[in-house]
Image: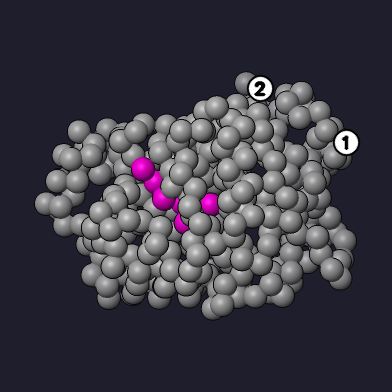
Amino acid sequence: MSLHQEKQIKTRLHTRNKNRTPYDIEALVLAVPELEHHLKKNKLGLPSVDFSSPIAVKLLNRALLSYYYQIGYWEFPDEHLCPPIPGRADYLHYMADVLRESNFGRMPAGNKITCLDVGVGASCIYPIIGVVEYDWNFIGSDIDSKSLMAAKKIRSNNASLKDKIDLRLQKNPNVFFQDILENEEKIDLSICNPPFHASLEEAQKGTRRKVKNLSGKKMSTPELNFSGVESELAYKGGELKFIQNMIWESRRNAENCYWFSTLVSKQSNLKAINSLLKKVAAKEIKEIPMGTGNKTTRIIAWTFLSKEEQKEWKRLRWQ
């Protein structure tokens, strides 16, 4: 690795994140040749991805999945959310660390771990990374049947995913675990990337600011550079209300899951979230900072299991 590359290492990403080093544009173009038509020169005169273009972003992610994760098919309708791979990978790596800490420093991997992705989306991104990196089993739930159809195509067209991901439709948009988990069903981890905005209009305003920052251009009707349909971007009451509702329901599923978790984008929401977790008597709460690019976010994880119940969980499922 050259000195220039060492200086460019994305040190804010998790040490196991495959995306810490600068993108190898030539290798990514070999993986997805179409990407070459969506590059532009950066300030150093080197080819770079046009992050203000949703097509370019999607092609970049497809190339990253092919190059780093050996995923040959990753297709879904353009209107659906196209997730940034490095941040999604970081979430899973940090939660793998939580599981390792809970298991005497040994990483519980493979078929011993089942993870529920609340809102799996059309891209199926968390299960993809979790299966490739840790060989976990996944349950992916979503309220949008079209998203699940796309996710099922991704699963069926990649041999490594076929027997590892169970996709389930959530028919009731007001619940998270009910009707998805059976009464006695156990999961070791739940993850969630909540809708950030309180309305689609708010999401569009945020995108106008982002596009202006990335390209210097003003847009009256912005094209979302990471796309996204309304159910992926907005929730009545915004991120805080979504997470609060999830916490209340998690209490009713306390014995079904070892670690519940969610991303929290807005730092201003942390006080209310921690207050509610104490109110519902979570036995243990973890706050894990994450940094991708210039953005800082965090994971909140909680469990209702007592120390004795945690020991019994590990004995029955992980040993």
Residue 163 point in image, percent of width and height: 46, 33
Q: Is residue 119 visible?
A: no
Q: Give me the disc on residue 251.
A: none
Residue 148 point in image, percent of width and height: 58, 51
Instruction: Confirm whether the magenta stretch covers residue 117.
Output: yes
Q: CA distance from mark 2 to mark 1?
A: 27 Å
- Which residue bears the numbered disc 1? 37
Extreme residue toward the top, this view: 1
- Residue occupying the point 78% across, 66% down: 208
Q: Nearer the viewer, residue 234 or 8?
A: 234
Q: Quadrant of the C terminus?
A: top left
Chief secondary structure of the magenta portion = strand
- Residue occupying the point 24% across, 36% down: 318
Q: Mark 2 vs mark 1: give the one in front.
A: 1
Q: Is residue 63 visible?
A: yes
- For label 2, the crowd category at 10 Å Cα-Cα, with few meaning under 14, some 14 to 19 and many 20 or more, is few
Q: Give left or right: position of 143 versus 275.
A: right
Residue 127 against residue 192 in the figure, above or below:
above
Q: Amino acid at mark 1?
A: His
Extreme residue toward the left, this view: 308
Residue 41 against residue 221 in the figure, above or below:
above
- Residue occupying the point 74% across, 71% down: 205
In magenta, the rendered stretch is 114-120
Q: Amino acid at mark 2?
A: Ser
Q: Nearer the viewer, residue 44 or 85?
A: 85
- Residue occupying the point 33% across, 65% down: 250
Q: Give left or right: position of 275 versus 306.
A: right
Q: Nearer the viewer, residue 230 or 302?
A: 230
Element assignment for label 2: loop
- Which residue bears the numbered disc 2? 2
Q: Quadrant of residue 232?
A: bottom right
